[in-house]
Image (spheres, rainbow, N blue to C red):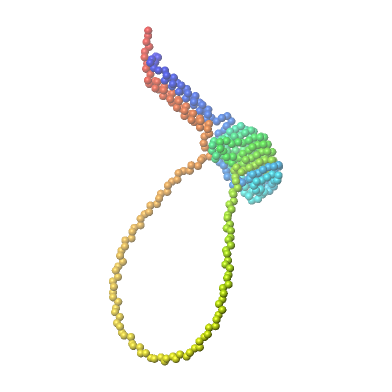
Amino acid sequence: MPRIGSNNKPRRLSSLALIAGIVCLVLAVALAVPAAGSQAAGLSAIAPGLGAAASFAALGGSTVTNTGPTVVNGDLGVSPGTAVTGFPPGIVNGTIHAGDAVALQAQNDVIIAYNALTSQACDVDLTGQDLGGMTLTPGVYCFSSSAQLTGILTLNAQGDPLSVWVFQIGSTLTTASNSSVGMINGGDLCNVFWQVGSSATLGTGTAFVGNILALTSITLTTGAGVDGRALARNGAVTMDSNNVSNVMCWSAPTPTDTPVATPTDTPVATPTDTPVATPTDTPVAAPTDTPVPAPTDTPVPPPPNTPVPPPPNTPVPPPPNTPVPAPTDTPVATPTALPPSTLPVSGGGLDSRQLLAAALGFLCLGLVLSGFALRRKEARNGVFLPIIRR
């Protein structure tokens, strides 16, 4: 039976609201899903401490060799080996530790950091995939065998400067010529760690970031650069016209000069000559004989017997009983519980794409609810009249 006298406008509004809400929800879901080529990991990555190795830009196990005008900003060392060659022509803006105690301690701390990296749980398994073209959020990424980078790898910190990336590589790490690793949205390159199960080789012109901790060796081919550290446990670090710098991750403590007091000269008084008076001869008078009178006996009267009165008995008053005030309990202030720490948690935060998706989702939900409300109002207020036959 047709609805006579009712307005079709609410029906149109409710239908439009429902359709717009559904389309809006589809767009919100599309924005929330990561773009093609991106990977999202968990928040389990932890940056290990490097101890004495933190000051090193390059550290080898057997040797460190160089060809060409390499520049190393940071300490350079080797242990248990002792051979460092190629400096000059290479330049080290730091200290060279060739088989000394500092290099030995650094290697021991590299072993601890390496083991800490291998023990972290894997968030995303990338075995068999090329890192080139990927955008990775903070997390632990693992390769059961070798890892390859051809092209550009982008690390998205999502606005969190404490974000950490850990790459666990079973065997070798290799980069193609002119490949690069970049960082966006406020990340810290010092929090990128590459744990390599055998050897790492960076291709010609590669621009690399992070800390490479390789079990065997690290080879930097012509023109490759590392912003971070190249730390090889057992083998050699081989360089050829490279730039390796850890200045973004470590700076030597600035010694403070202790002021030394300048001694002041205390003036010494000049002695003055004091004139000495010349003694004069004083005439001494001749002694005269003075007659001494003879002593006379003077009678001494006997002392009188004066009676001594007995001391009076003066009563001593008892001491008054002074009341001693009772000790009062001093209230002890109850310690106030401090609020919990509000330090930022590594890996948190949403990027602009996810925030837009969330806002759009709320808007879509409102449109859908409005559509249902209009439909219910239409059903409640509708008036039905019989068909009038002619």
Q: Is residue 73 visible in the rendered structure shown here?
A: yes
Q: Quadrant of residue 111?
A: top right
Count of numbered circles in the view:
0
Q: Does residue 287 appear left or right of residue 318 in this picture?
A: right
Q: Residue at x 58, y 58 (%)?
A: 262
Q: Quadrant of the N terminus?
A: top left
Q: Is residue 43 visible in the rendered structure shown here?
A: no
Q: Residue at x 51, y 26 (%)?
A: 27
Q: Quadrant of residue 186?
A: top right
Q: Is 68 above or below relative to 255?
A: above
Q: Position of residue 315 (x, y in %)?
A: 28, 71
The one nearer the camera, 68 or 196, is 68
Q: Residue at x 59, y 49 (%)?
A: 254
Q: Quadrant of residue 389?
A: top left
Q: Quadrant of the C terminus?
A: top left
Q: Position of residue 382 (x, y in %)?
A: 38, 18
Q: Is 268 above or below relative to 54?
A: below
Q: Which residue reaches farthest top? A: 390
Q: Residue at x 68, y 45 (%)?
A: 91
Q: Position of residue 332 (x, y in %)?
A: 40, 52
Q: Is 384 above or below relative to 337?
A: above
Q: Position of residue 34 (x, y in %)?
A: 55, 30
Q: Is 203 above or below relative to 323?
A: above
